[in-house]
Amino acid sequence: MEKLSKLFSQMFDVSTTAHLLSYDFVQQAVIAAALLGLLAGAIGPLIISRQMSFAVHGTSELSLTGAAAALLAGIGVGTGAIIGSVVAAVLFGVLGSRARERDSVIAVVLSFGLGLSVLFLWLGPERAGSKFSLLTGQVVSVGNTGLGLLATCTAAVLVVLAAVYRPLLFASSDPEVAVARGVPVRALSIVFAVLLGVTAAFGVQIVGALLVLSLLITPAAAAAQLTASPARVAVLSIVFAEIAAVGGILLSLAPGVPISTFVTTISFTIYLICRIVGSRTRNRRRILVAA
């Protein structure tokens, strides 16, 4: 209890937080968290509409495989995470294009990939900090190079997402009708899988492979509790993801706790509030309709 009380007091130590924000690497970390919040918030509603939450988990876990392989080979962990995520997402998109097969395909690929992760981490150099950061994230190590790569990939993902958003939303909402209308559903699935893989890879670097769902799924799920409008859900999802990502890193600075701890807590709190507000709003509407 004493440690918990100390942690709570350190969270709101404004002077220490302000001092840490004066460092370049901390400023870069905040910008990286903001970019990830934008990316995750934009893609999250489509993940939910396509019922691919489990795919996000699988993709993030398999980015760990790519990162572990990169650590073993002595190359950039971030590059390895992106390659691992994209390969996994494409496999999920190609092999699990039919909804009834998706879960089993993800489970099969995920178990194989995690087995390789264990092997690569065991064979890799004895850098416990690097291995631990693959699971919990290490946003303060982003640096100028990583930040530039994140900014470039964020812009690219958002441009592609904007270009395919309408047909992708149609294919996500009613794939059978979309096929009948001539929408290239399979090609869109692969494109979306690549976008998801890139997003998950950067999420892993910041919040870790274990907790990336807190940014890619929870904000969008919270937004869906408040409105059925795809546009409003997208906007609210981005707002909630930004609050969780940036708020998480600001709260984590003074106590020195991994950012994922606060990101998940903020995301879950937002979801609970939205669920309560959404439930009350729906109940009032039912009462008005009945009256």
Image (tube, rainbow, N blue to C red):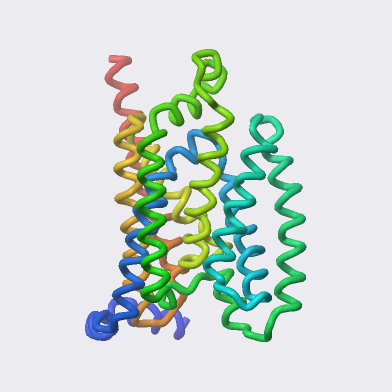
Q: In this view, does 204 lie above or below 88?
A: below
Where residue 111 sits, quadrant-wise, is bottom right
Residue at the image point whose x is 73% and y is 71% from the top? 120
Q: In the rendered view of the protein, which quadrant contains the C terminus? A: top left
Residue at the image point whose x is 36% and y is 42% from the top? 223
Q: In this view, does 135 lie above or below 42?
A: below
The answer to whether residue 54 is seen in the rendering is: yes
Rendered location of residue 249, percent (x, y):
36, 70
Rendered location of residue 148, percent (x, y):
37, 66
Residue at the image point whose x is 43% and y is 44% from the top? 43
Residue at the image point whose x is 38% and y is 60% from the top? 266
Where residue 85 sits, quadrant-wise, is bottom right
The answer to whether residue 271 is seen in the rendering is: no
Count the labels in the image: 0
- Relative to residue 123, is residue 127 drawn left or right? left
Rendered location of residue 113, percent (x, y):
72, 58
Q: Which one is nearer the viewer's eye here, 236 or 82?
A: 82
